[in-house]
Each structure stands twice: as structure tokens, then as C-alpha cells.
Amino acid sequence: MSDVPGLGRGRVRSRLARRAQIAVQRRRVFGYLVTVTAVIAVLTGFVAHLIDKKDFPTFGIGVWWSIVTLGTVGYGDVVPHTAWGRVLGGAVIVFGVTFISFLIAIVTSLFVDANRADDQDARDAQHEQTQALLQEISTRLSAIETTLGAAPGADRP
């Protein structure tokens, strides 16, 4: 990547990770997943059409094959027969399986983290309520001790 600030890979990943985390916290992940999958399908479908026009005569057929292959369905209605088409097919299969696995792991992790944060907030609120109750009990106990200490004939240890 470039040395220009703001164009580094780390910054882009950080921004995407932040947006993904916000989407998970708001429970709106579906749109992001659809977008990423669609972009990958279109790109690989375009490459398939460019490198193997015999098996992928139109851009649409290339995209259809890419979607079916990325989703690990593999209907078999469109199959690459050239060496480069098969290389692309193998890469799309490996990428599809890997992408889906990582995607599931990441989304699951983000959901767990979001739930963990919600649980921590609930525990913090409960802790504050407990502290307030203990303070109230302590105040009442002090008032009772004062009242008992001031009563005539009170026995104090």
C-alpha cells in the first residue's frame, strides 16, 4: 500500500472492523454480508468470463457460477473445462469455504462480545443497586443504634 496517511491497510481494516462491530451491536449484519458476497461474486464472475469465454459465454453466467460455487452448492449446470477456469474454480471454492468459515466465526465472536458487554452492564447496574441498598441498611442501622443508645436504661456492651 501507499505511505500516504489514511490509505494504509491497517486503517482500512480498522474502519471496516469498527463498522462490522457496530452492525453486530445493532443486529444489522445481513446487509454487510450480502454486500461482501455480491461484490466477490461479481468480481469472480467477471474474471471467469474474461479467462474462459467458452464455458462462461456471458457475464451473467459467470456471476451465476460464482454465486453457486461461493455458496458451496455446485449445481453443475456451469462447469469450467479449461485449465485457467479450473484454477479459478478451485480458488473460488477454497475462498468460499474459507470465507464462510471465517465469516461465521467473526460474526459469532462479535455477537458473543456484544452479549458479554450487555451482561456486564446488567451486572454493573445490579452492583450499584446492591451498594445503594447496603448504604440504606447502614444508615437505618446507625439510626437504630442511636435510638437504642439514647433510650433510658439501654444496656450497651
Image (cartoon, helix red, strand yellow):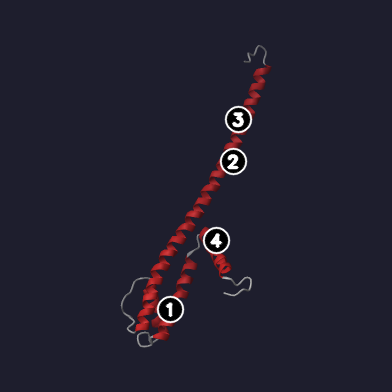
* Front residue (pair 57, 89): 89
- Looking at the rendered structure, the kind of residue marked 1 is Thr
Q: Nearer the viewer, mark 3 or mark 4?
A: 4
Mark 2, residue position: 128
| Amino acid type assigned to the residue bearing label 2 in the image | Glu
| Quadrant in which residue 93 is drawn | bottom left
Question: Which one is in front in this view, the residue at disc 2 or the one at disc 1?
Answer: 1
C-alpha separation, residue under disc 3 versus residue under disc 4: 41 Å
Q: Residues within 10 Å of mark 3 (few under 14, many from 20)?
A: few
Residue picked out by circle 1: 44
Where does the C terminus fall, quadrant-wise?
Answer: top right
For the residues bearing labels 3 and 4, Cβ distance under 8 angstroms: no
Q: CA distance from mark 3 to mark 2?
A: 14 Å
Q: Give the distance between the C-alpha atoms of the residues marked 1 and 3, in whole angstroms.
A: 68 Å
Q: Earlier in the sequence, mark 4 or mark 1?
A: 4
Q: Secondary structure at mark 2?
A: helix
> Is 24 left, or right, of 88 in this rendering?
right
Residue depicted at x 62% and y 29%: 138
For badge 4, the amino acid type reads Ile
Residue identified by numbered label 3? 137
Q: CA distance from mark 2 to mark 1?
A: 54 Å
Q: Which of labels 1 and 3 is toward the front?
A: 1
Q: Is residue 71 left or right of residue 135?
A: left
Label annotation for residue 22: 4
Using the image, determine if residue 52 lies above or below residue 94: below
- Of residues 21 and 135, which is closer to you in this image? 21
Q: Secondary structure at mark 4?
A: helix
Mark 2 and mark 1 lie on one chain; the one further toward the N terminus is 1
Q: CA distance from mark 2 to mark 4?
A: 27 Å
Locate residue 111, reporting x and y percent: 48, 57
Q: Is residue 146 above or below residue 50?
A: above
